[in-house]
Amino acid sequence: MVRARLASGLARAARAATQAPRQALFSEGRAALATSAARNSGAAATAVRASAGTNGGYSRWFPAAAFLPAAAYMALDQTVEAAELERTFIAIKPDGVQRGLISEIVGRFERKGYKLVAIKLIVPTKEFAAQHYDDLSSRPFFDGLCDFLSSGPVVAMVWEGQGVIKYGRKLIGATSPQASEPGTIRGDLCVQVSRNIIHGSDGPETAVNEIGLWFKPEELVSYTKNDEKWLYE
């Protein structure tokens, strides 16, 4: 009887040892995949150790991803993809508007594949221009900047896409048209730095501040374009 009880106890212990790592494996696998996806390094490389208490015991390694359904991959991929989208503020200054360059400039951002999510025509006051150029308030040319930005209509826009802040600046070109490469907006379409036709946010924090200054939240439109499936995987 003692032997029977001992055998029964050993059998239960063996089953528990087999099931416990399996449950832990699912939990560890989900955590590992989430971490890997967040780092965009690929879940397939993540592995967790599964041990089973058989004769003498043994260890095997399995990809954590093998224990997760395909839907989990898709959800995580979409989260990472969505996190890469960003928005930037772009303004066509009074000289660009007066020279009839609105469609040319909008077209360049559209042809790149970026999405227009807000646009309006506005004549800023000098006080509003001073808010826009607040970071340059200590510069000797500050007053002239404010005078010029408030001298006529400005096309204010918000564009969305992967890398739109950094690459939007590349599309625009250097601050001075003379230093801008051919193919950029300033390199192709203007001559003097005081008439450089366009403004673009220079970083994520600036983009958030400028979008908040020029647009109310309800003026920003979220939508899906039909060509997005041909732009993003």
Image: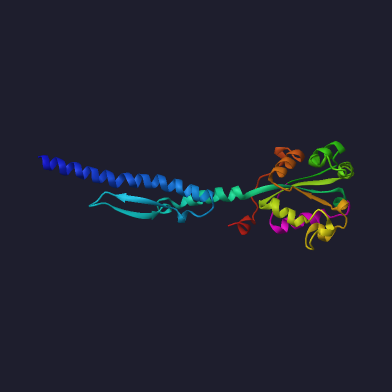
Q: Is 99 or 139 nearer to us in this picture?
A: 139
Residue 80: x %, y % from top left: 56, 49
Residue depicted at 26% across the width and 51% down the height: 57
Q: Is residue 100 magenta?
A: yes
Q: Residue furthest bottom?
A: 182
Q: Is 16 or 91 nearer to us in this picture?
A: 16
Left or right: where does residue 202 sit relative to residue 153? left
Q: Is residue 188 magenta?
A: no
Q: Which residues make up the magenta segment?
A: 98-117
Residue 17: x %, y % from top left: 28, 45
Left or right: where does residue 91 sit relative to residue 20? right
Quadrant the C terminus occupies? bottom right
Is 218 situated above or below 182? above
Residue depicted at 80% across the width and 59% down the height: 180
Among the 4 quarters of the image, the one containing residue 211: top right
Quadrant the N terminus occupies? top left
Q: What's the magenta bit mostly, secondary-structure-wise?
A: helix
Residue 65: x %, y % from top left: 43, 53
Q: Residue furthest top?
A: 127
Residue 92: x %, y % from top left: 81, 49
